[in-house]
Amino acid sequence: MVENRFLIAGSILSADLLNLERDVGEALEKGVDIIHFDVMDYHFVPNMTFGPAFLKALRDKFPSAVFDVHLMVSPVSENIVDDYINAGASWISFHPEACIHTQRMLAHIKERGVKSGLVLNPSTPPTMLKYLWNVLDFVLVMTVNPGFGGQKIIPLTLEKVKDIAAMALGFEHQIMIEVDGGVKASNIKEIATCGANVFVVGSAFFGVENKEQALTAFRAALS
């Protein structure tokens, strides 16, 4: 089964990188539930972003915030995972293509007291999830190809969200389904109807002047 509460995660990939403290503070003040922290290494995706030191600096400023760390790195190692956990990660997810021992890594994350998640690219099938339910807290479905913000949703990925929701229901497993890529006020209701309950918003939130109005529009669409 899937949790019913809808959560909004603001992706700092779309924030003002020279003013992250300001933008994260404003997002939390306006009512964003989660701060989504994209980690890229120039290997798994053709871009490079935030190391553990960035996360540690934000954690020190915002001790009660929920930081959702999405690792787009290769390979995923316990050292990398532990660095982000020690820096203040609340959730950590990674791509199975970048990890040899997926089950063991998910179990390690849970043992460290952090929510564990697996990320599925648009072309990654969800069949492996049936063997991982006991070490999973959430599944992050990429509705665009990872690496850059501002992309449009790939429509068929919403069918995957439906499939995962049905699988979780069939296995009677409590799990969150997170969606990342192209989420807007105009499509968030459709995505929720497919079974998602955590929504990563980037340019549709950080890229607009009136963030409170944007967040209100998301909430209204989900009500």
Image (cartoon, rainbow, N blue to C red):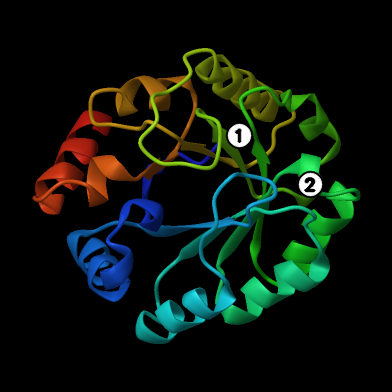
61 or 112: nearer the eye? 61
Vertical side of 7 occupied by 38: above or below = below
Task: For label 2, count other residues whose C-alpha is less than 10 Å away and answer few (under 14), some (14-19) or many (20+).
Answer: some
The part of the image, by quadrant, that contains residue 191 is: top left
Mark 2 → mark 1, Cα distance in angstroms: 28 Å
- Residue that appears at 79% across and 40% down: 97
Residue 216 lies left or right of residue 101; in this view the side is left
Task: For label 1, count other residues whose C-alpha is less than 10 Å away and answer few (under 14), some (14-19) or many (20+).
Answer: some
Residue 39 lies left or right of residue 100; in this view the side is left
Q: Position of residue 156 (x, y in %)?
A: 54, 13
State the residue position of label 1.
Answer: 1
Q: Position of residue 99 (x, y in %)?
A: 83, 49
- Residue that appears at 51% across and 41% down: 3
State the residue position of label 2.
Answer: 98
Vertical side of 196 occupied by 71: above or below = below
Count of numbered circles in the view: 2
Vertical side of 176 occupied by 36: above or below = below
- In this rendering, which labeled residue sits more in front, label 2 or label 1? 2
The part of the image, by quadrant, that contains residue 189 is: top left
Q: Which numbered disc flags the more N-terminal residue, 2 or 1?
A: 1
- Residue that appears at 29% across and 43% down: 203
In which quadrant will I find the C terminus? top left
Residue 180 lies left or right of residue 27; in this view the side is right
Q: Position of residue 5 (x, y in %)?
A: 40, 43
